[in-house]
Amino acid sequence: MTEELPAPVDAALRVASAVFAIVFALVVASALATPFADLAVRLGLVADGGNGWQLLRTLGQFAGFLVAVAGYLVFTDQRDLLRFSRPSLREVGIVFGAGILLLGLQYSSLFALREVGLSTGQNQAVVPAGDPVGYYLAMVAVSLFVVGPVEEVLFRGVVQGGLRRAFDAPPAILLASVLFGLVHLSGIQGTAVERWAYVAVVILLGCVLGYLYERTGNVLVPGLAHGVYNAAIYAVLLANAV
């Protein structure tokens, strides 16, 4: 019979486990992303450092996230941690509604920051290595079907799901969202204030995604909503680049 841990100890272990899952995912992604893109260069499929290389590096990174998530779930014997199913018609409506809400929250946050004389840094992922039109067009699809869903599998499914076993919903959502925001910090260009302002906006958006997962119990709902939001950002960039 397994002895139950005291609540504070269990909570601390759950936070440590969530941090470990994120660090493990980042390490695996780092080990796969650049070698995967470099292999394509050696095979003559893409130019070194070009848009194709950058896109393949992104795909390799998120493949690494999935490999890490699978390994984490097996290693910790928590295969039941992820909750997902084919979205219902109602959930499809929630996905698109939430995507629009996230976009609105982002622009509202940027407006509010400008009103107090602040701005956010720039995410390096939106900076193309070559022709912006081709890159943004490809990233619309990659964001929708890869980036959004995979990030949510990690941060909402594994991280928030694990925290939820020791915390009530609000602190679990907030903790997962803070970790989600902090992970983005290294990929942001700008001053220290601009980078932290960006992280604050990401935390806010993460809380919305966490709430979606809590309410629906289906990680594909926040995953696709996240994808719709990201895809919309690249669609706006594409429209401005044409």
Image (cartoon, helix red, strand yellow):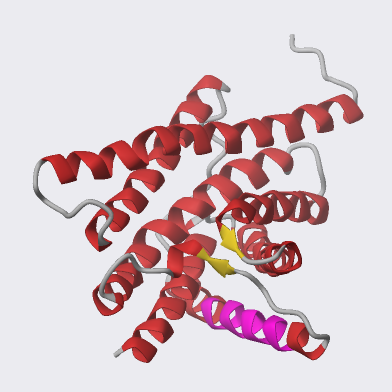
Splitting the image into 4 quarters, where does residue 9 fall?
A: top right
113 with respect to 24 (left or right): right
x, y percentage for residue 141?
Answer: 31, 68
Q: Which residues, given as a range, are shown in magenta? A: 99-111
Magenta span dominant secondary structure: helix
Splitting the image into 4 quarters, where does residue 203 fall?
A: bottom right
Residue 110 within the magenta-colored segment of the rendering: yes
- Closer to the camera, 241 or 204? 241
**Which residue appears at 29% of the width and 90% of the height?**
242
- Closer to the camera, 99 or 235? 235
Q: Is residue 44 above or below residue 74?
A: below
8 with respect to 186 (left or right): right
Residue 137 within the magenta-colored segment of the rendering: no
**Which residue appears at 60% of the width and 51% of the height?**
186
- Closer to the camera, 148 or 31? 31
Q: Quadrant of the N terminus?
A: top right
141 with respect to 143 (left or right): left
78 with respect to 38 (left or right): right
x, y percentage for residue 165?
Answer: 73, 38
Q: Residue furthest left?
A: 44
x, y percentage for residue 215?
Answer: 66, 62
Q: Is residue 20 above or below residue 242?
A: above
Number of residue marks:
0
x, y percentage for residue 40?
Answer: 17, 44
Q: Is residue 145 above or below residue 13?
A: below
**Which residue appears at 58% of the width and 22% of the height?**
76
